[in-house]
Every structure is written in structure tokens, then in C-alpha cells.
Amino acid sequence: MSVGEEVRTDQNRPQQSLGTAAARNLATTTKSVPQMQEISSRWLLRTLPWVDVQGGTYRVNRRLTYAVGDGRITFVKTGDQVEVIPNELGELPALRSYADEEVLAELARRCRQREVAPGEVIADFGHRTDEVYLLAHGRVEKIGTGPYGDDAVLGVLADGAYFGDQALLDPEAIWEYTVRADTATTVLVLSRQDFQQVAERSDSLSAHLERLRSIPRQRTNKYGEKEVELAAGHSGEPDIPHTFVDYEPRPREYELSIAQTVLRIHTRVADLYNQPMNQTEQQLRLTVEALKERQEHELINNPEFGLLSNCEYDQRIQPHDGAPSPDDMDELLSRRRGTKLFLAHPRAIAAFGRELNKRGLVPETIDIGGNRIPTWRGVPIYPCNKIPVSEARTTSIIAMRTGESEQGVIGLRQSGIPDEIEPSLSVRFMGINEQAIIKYLVTAYYSAAVLVPDALGVLENVEIGRWR
């Protein structure tokens, strides 16, 4: 008998036992709880120290600071033409708090666009400063002379920065460093001559500039705070200086933000389909997980209190070569004392790892809750997929000092709210409607505060797509 005949004979035999398909009708199925791809590690929520805000608002009192004009300027691009938004000129120290829109619009029209090639010198050390440069796009380096006569990079400026603004108030100002384009760069140039012509025809601008020149220069520390007069190392009976510490007259207040949703469950489902898993519990569990994911996203990206938006501009640095190198991470660390953690997109961590591999470096890791977390200089680098990645494949790396006692970054919440299931997170029964649908209001209250500016720093425009 051939093989084919044997197979046909087996198929014709009568069934001798119960088949698996029928047996499953009597079996109890072992099943998992509902799974959810959106759930992430949420390291920011886990590592941020939380402070209870019983009044719903947290006020950050600081010493009075006299430093002004350290913001960034926004532009409008139409085709290949770039224009500065007139009101954004108020970020320049000479125009801070100046509000005449017609005059600002005239100054904006006098800004000339200039394209700069990579490696081209925009301003040269020692020459007269007679133009203000507004950096619309690209990256430039501020280059000075090192202690041994060689060139030293003093800093890197990127989109929205400006330089040469001292020309508007001081006709004798000179460039104290050389500015060289690191990439193809677009700048808008406002000459001192054009500025003076507008000022001569505008009484309001002339009065504003005169008022600035008449204000006595305050003695401040390097942070822009009024200096506390002290005497030290003296002998005898000299007059001891008198002093006081002034506070900001209008301190910033952080109100708790909110994330909410209404969960709906039909009573038939809640009544009949609760074994072996409670449908209401599972629905609430997944809803709370989604709410926490949104909470962490807001703590990173919210324009009012998010970390990326609230980092001071002098605490934002640019990578020297695009990719996140150990040198860039060291520069980010050097901007503050007691950095407790880095936050970076997983792809940024991978890019940093490639740079370490090129140099033959192996980062140390630490165990946190059973997870091996990479570190740099002993500071853990936590992954956070809420940090955005741009279409140009660039992202940011955040460095923080945390804790209220350390004048760092803190999370804000209010414990003890009605129907609370976790601190500052509640599930409130809203009743049953005429369609027999149960409704629950799920609410989370939260915010974040930066107690002093140097508690938070950002390495911006980090390239994550470089493989060589």
C-alpha cells in the first residue's frame, strides 16, 4: 500500500476520543487582564519630589533680580524671507518694557536679512559694535582667546538668540569675542544708525532710552540679584555696611493644572460580566494609566509649567557637534550644583551611547527598582518618551536638581481631595443616566515648579540620527 493510501485510510477512521475543539466548551479559559501599549516607565512621576499644595496654588518667592533682556526672539518665515515679530524686539535689553507697537514695527522693517555660510566670521573681536544680530536660524559660536593664546569656544547660540545688543545703548562698545557661523545661518541685522534714526523721530523711544541711562546701576551678584553688602577681614572699628535682602514684588504663582475624563460603563456589563475580572476595576485601571501618561506629558511639554518651556534661556545650551557627546553632558552638569537626574528620550540615550562607543567609554549603571539605569558622572539618565523628537530628528536632554530643600524642581499636588484613590487623583461617581449607563469622573491635579533658575537645564537640538 502506498503512503497516499495509508493517509486516506486514517482519515476515514471513526473518532475514538473527544476533540480539543469540543473540550474547550467545558474548560475554564485562563486569561490576562487587559493590556495597554501606552503604559511607559514614567520615571519623571516616580523621581520628582511631590509637595502638597493645600490652597491649590504654590507661590515661589525669590530675591529681587535686576537682570533683564535674556529671552529669545521669534520670527515669521514666508518662503525664503524671514521677518522678526515687532513685539519680540522687546526681548532686547534696550527695548525691555517698551510697548509702542508702531515704533517696534518700524524697527522690525529696518532689520536686514543676511545669509551666512558655515565658517564665516560674523563679528570680529576688538572691532566697533555697530550692529545687532538676531539669529533666525542656524548655529554660531562665540570664540575668545584662551589662556595660552589659542581659540576657545565661549558658547554656542542657536535659533532665537541675539548678540551685539550693547550697540543700541553704548556708541563706544566693542566686540569682546568673535562670532563665527557653525552652520548655514540666517540672521537679521539692525544697525545702530537705523536705531538712532528711529529714536530721533520717536519721542516715546527717546524718553525710554533716556530713562534707561538715568537709572543708577545696581550692584548685583553674578545671578543678577541685588548684592548683599558685607564686610570681611577688617580690623579695628570700621563702619560696618548696612544692607537688606529685597524680594520680587510679583512672585510667580503656580496653580494646579487638571486632567479629567468621564468613564462610562453600562450597568448590564457591570452587573453580569464581572467574573473572573471586575469590569469596572479594569476600566478604571486603564483610564488611570492613560491619565498618568498625559500627566507626565504635560509636566514636560505644557507651555505654562512644563519643564521644556520653563527652563531659563541662559540654562539652555547647544551641542558642539550636533550629537550628544560626553563634553556636552559635562557642560550641562557644570551649569548647576547637585544635579540629581537626566531625562532623555530613549533615542537620545542611544545616540549618547554611540558617542561613548566612539571614544571607548563604558557608562556605569545603577540598579533602581530592579532596572539597570545608565549614568554619567554618577547621575542617572532616565528614559522619557514624552520629550518630543522633531522632524529634523533632534530632541532635548533635561538635567535637574530636585527637592524643595535643595531649591530644585518639585512636583505639585493636593492630597486629601474627595473620593481620592491616589494622592491628588480621584474617581467620583456621577450617577446613572436614562440609558442605564454609569458615569465616573476621573480627575488628576498636578503641576511643577522651578524654585531657582539654575535648578533646570536643557541640552537642545541634539541629533539622534548620526551613525558615523
Image (cartoon, helix red, strand yellow):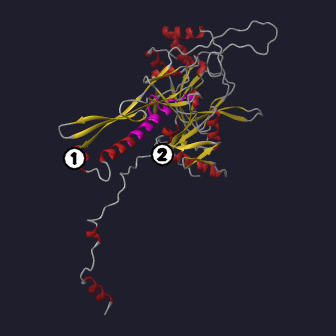
**Most foreground residue, 208 or 97:** 97
Percent from the top left, x then y, of residue 93? Answer: 56, 19
For the N terminus, the quadrant is: bottom left
Report the amino acid beneath label 1.
Answer: Arg
Q: Residue furthest bottom?
A: 1
Q: Tell which tag, 1 or 2, sits nearer the viewer.
A: 1
Crowd band around label 1 with a 10 angstrom C-alpha radius: few (<14), some (14–19), many (20+): few
Image mark count: 2
Label 1 and label 2: CA atoms lie apart by 35 Å
Quick one: label 1 or label 2, which is nearer the N terminus? Answer: 2
Q: Residue at x 52, y 17 (%)?
A: 96
On residue 268, the disc is 1
Percent from the top left, x then y, of residue 270? Answer: 26, 46
Percent from the top left, x then y, of residue 197? Answer: 53, 14
Percent from the top left, x then y, of residue 256? Answer: 42, 27
Q: Residue furthest right?
A: 236
Q: Which residue is mark 2?
A: 41
- Do tag 1 and tag 2 residues touch (Cβ < 8 Å)? no
**Most foreground residue, 365 or 185:** 365
Q: Secondary structure at mark 2?
A: loop
Residue 382 appears in the figure: yes
Q: Secondary structure at mark 1?
A: helix
Vertical placement of residue 460 versus 232, above or below: below
Q: Is residue 25 magenta?
A: no
On residue 339, the disc is none
Report the amino acid beneath label 2.
Answer: Ser
Q: Residue at x 56, y 31 (%)?
A: 403
| Quadrant of the image occupied by residue 146 | top right
Q: Which residues are magenta?
A: 290-315
Residue 321 appears in the figure: no
Q: Main secondary structure of the magenta part?
A: helix
Vertical placement of residue 76 versus 289, above or below: above
